[in-house]
Amino acid sequence: MDGKKTKSPKFLIKYLVVAGAVCFAIAYGNTNAFFAHNLVLIFLYMGLSQAWNIIGGYAGQLSLGHVAFFGIGSYTSTLLYLNYGITPWIGALVGAALAAVVAYGLGWATLRLKGAYFTLATIAFAEVLRILATNFSGITKGAQGVGIPFRPELGNMIFRGKTGYVILALGFAVIVYLVCRYMDRTRLGYYLAAIREDETTSASMGINVANNKVLAMVLSAVFTAIGGTVYAQYILFIEPASEFSYSVSLNMALFAIFGGLGSLYGPIVGAAILIPIQEYLRVTFGGSLPGLHLAMFGLVLIITVLLMPKGVFPTIQGFVQGRIARSQKKKLRGEGSQ
Amino acid sequence: MKKIRVVALFVALILVLTVFATGCGSDDASSGGSDEETIKIGILFPFSGSLAKLGEETYAGVEYAQWEINEAGGINGKQVEFVIADAVDATAAVAEAERLITVEGCKVIVGSYSSSISQAASEVAERNGVIYWETGGVAKSITERGFQYLFRVCPTSAEYGTIAADYTNDEIGPALGVDPKDLKIAIIYEDGAYGVAVSEAAEARAEELGLNVVVSEAYSATATDLSSLVMKVKAAEPDVIWATQYATDLLLFWKQAKELGLTCKAYVGTGGATGTAEFRDAFPAEDTQYVLNVAFASDGSNEAYANGLTEFYAAYEEKNGTPPPSVYTIVGYSGAKVLWQVLEDAGEMDPEKIREAALAIDIPEGSLPTGWGVKFAGPDEENAGQNLRAHNIVDQLQDGELVVLYPEAAKDPDSKLYLPLPYLAG
Amino acid sequence: MQLIIQIAISGLLMGGIYSMVSMGLSLIYGVTGIVNFAHGEFLMVAMFLTWGLNSLLGLDPYISVILVVPLMFLIGMLVEKTVIEPIIKAPHSMQIMATAGLSTVLANGALMLMSANYRSVITGYSSKTLNMAGIMFNVPKLVGFFAAVALTVLLALFLKRTYTGRAITATAQDMKAAQLMGINIKRIYLIAFGLGTACVGVAGVVLMPMYYVFPSLGTYFCTTAFVIVVLGGMGNIYGAFVGGLVIGMVEAFSGYLLAPVYKEVVYFVIFIIILIVKPSGILGRSGRAA
């Protein structure tokens, strides 16, 4: 991105291609609601996975309890909307703020933990929230869940057709992308990368390891919570079992890991590939033998790890770069021989 | 720059993959090519994941009903064709409902056993003006949303609770020779949507009747040890226990209750787990003797009340080689049979016509194998779409057989309530 | 008083079961550094094997241990060879993805083969209880408790007294040094993974007479096992034993004193506190020693 000036027309073309493809997808989604649903899911998880990537990828702290923030986001906005009529647009921000506070506390407590310990602590934390949400039924309505009445209106963040949701989820993904891209190029991004590579060295170079990790955790939680609100407004029914479900945590992490941990595009690529695979397998094999589609999905994960142990995006990137380098080398050699 | 090119490539890949995924279904639709001659119905149940077992068992009944109607020449001469979708959780339920409607072109979706799956999927059906036919999801809130295209054949969860309280008041008390108000009642329930709904209804009814609930305790159905629950209930020294449980937790509780010396005089399972073959098979008959069960009607029901139940059992076993796996199978079967009737009345697969036919249907109680009749609450009434003639029964395990005791119409004149419970007599 | 003793005994006996389930997980982590998210599914597989041997050959669960444990050892080695070995040096994230994928494959493979039904083995001793001065001891649980003790002792002896065992310990303490001393690391990883899986095989056998097996069973035990392993210090098998007993007791008492629904909250909170105060676990030393 250094040669912005010289390459600007080309640069623009690529953005136009992406924008064109997305517009086409939305337009097609308008005619096929199932396709549109998949787009909503893909964009939503692109955003969520990118948010997870801030702490899991950039800072290298593998959280498997991010659904805690997801649940905080969805419950906060929904309860504010239903009990006090506060629009989910504001509710999402309140949920994000709450998630930030919780992430700050949790971050200070657990981010000193190394590797697997941190992962397990986050799993436990999310489980605690799930149990509390199930049993504090005075606030959360408990296990029976909360239905959001269908009143389509922009102000209610509820839309009649799917297109509104596709755009909402896309907007969410784009915002998280822009934040990540900004972060990638600022000091925080470099600090986090340094911390991930070698904590001790980073500390000795004057980087405040704890502060930066907590900051990453808070940022990550904020966007995860907003994603939770988007999800709640889309499904219009929330319950502790799905809002604090371990599988959401796992998915967020898997998509980012699959695509390529700690790279700006990894989560985007991961969500864009894995969700269609998931849906395709379920549509094709869901009606046959129970469990078959999930078992196949598990196999996809294992095979990916075995074939591309760095993640899909870096592997392909490496491949493309390798070819470019090779072709350049060839050119050079060709010139040399002349 | 290279990065962006790669990303552009991947965005294109999303399109290809997703179009592939969404298009795949439509291939089936067109290759079927016989939309005119068959009636296509979307089937939405959890076939994998933690809800798989009872989802599968409910569907077994629906599947049998499909076979039966097709053997008999179909509905108005058309064969019934199923498009099956696996709704693992609420998100998948939305996706699959969307697919069944837009890609497969289904006008009727039959679901779904699980209440949360039903909540999420029926929302989609409603918005698309497609009939959602609920056979087994019992949460009351499903029909509290005033939906136009949603019909539920089975009773709500609240029924289990109220009947447990009524039965305790009317029958258990007198049978034990005690004023019901002097009975100490313990309520235990799994902490999911189902357990909470049933226990709340039971507690509310108990209060109306002036019954004495001494302890009410929730627990997680996935618990691997229930000794603390048992000890807690034991300390309250209850006479009657109302329990809303799934299968594994019932089996665990039943074992540990005996081991830790819990005593009570009557045990009322609210919701059917105590009526399953698993419960009967896991213990010798004397250990399950006189357990009471608030449930859907099943094999112990009197023939005059549960119309066609015996035939269903025999025919199902003849076709599949095994008896129906559980009472949920009968529920699925009954629900589907009502749907066939409605579709026949409607004449064509138009949601509006089907809706009118459903609202017009009027079947007296005792007509279905579950003992239910059918009359759906109208769109302006409370609980729109709820079958007002679906009720639960109370039965009791006597020598390993379920004997129906309530309501009076379902009861065999010779059968009677036996108490106290020998297994937990202490 | 009697009530409190009964609660403590119930908790302790259940704790023994938990210990046994966790021991293999701890061993595998200690040696290979891999957190096996498919551990609960291995337990499910072991229980299905026990059930299968019982229903096909009529073997008593406790006797079937002589077949189940070697089978699980082989399964463990097979999995290690195909899935774990290639990723042994990969980043944690990839290991999580691989073992999470493995857990999905095993749970759903079982669903495909066995359906979602619950299966149990009924034995004459399934619900036998011993009554000692009003305190109830459930016989299969008592057996489970002693099996846990025996397993801990045997494992400790194996790790201390045999060449392979000492090689495993050495690898756990310092992989590079062990390699320099001429230990075949690949083989050690293979054996350790097989051994960890065999341990969960014992747990499966012991659980079968008192519990039920179904495809999604793994998740019921998985989180508890994680908590225990961390509590005891990851990689420490005595720690796993003590951790199991502690969790069993905490569960029993908090379930009784507070409410059954909150017992998980209580031990998760304890878990998080211990992680913060003493990240190496209650019996933990620094490092991943066994």
Image (spheres, helix red, strand yellow):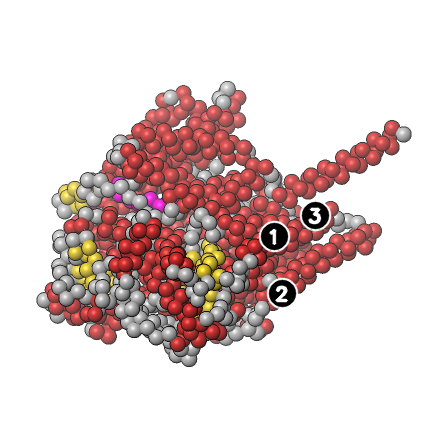
**Chief secondary structure of the magenta portion:** loop
User: For the residue marked with disc 3, what is the amino acid?
Assistant: Val
Dot 3 falls on a residue whose secondary structure is: helix
Mark on residue B6? 3
What residue would you read off at disc 1? Answer: B20
Q: Residues within 10 Å of mark 2 (few under 14, many from 20)?
A: some
* Residue furthest left as drawn: B177
Q: Which residues are magenta?
A: C209-215
CA separation in Å, label 2 and label 3: 27 Å
Label 1 neighbourhood size at 10 Å, few (<14), some (14-19), many (20+)? Answer: some
Q: Which percent across, then down, holds residue A74?
A: 50, 63
Q: CA distance from mark 1 to mark 2?
A: 17 Å
Q: Are discs 1 and 2 less than 8 Å apart at CB? A: no
Nearer mark to the viewer, of 2 and 3? 2
Horizontal relation, residue A320 to residue C26: left or right: right
Q: Residue at x 46, y 63 (%)?
A: B78
Q: Position of residue C280 (x, y in %)?
A: 43, 40
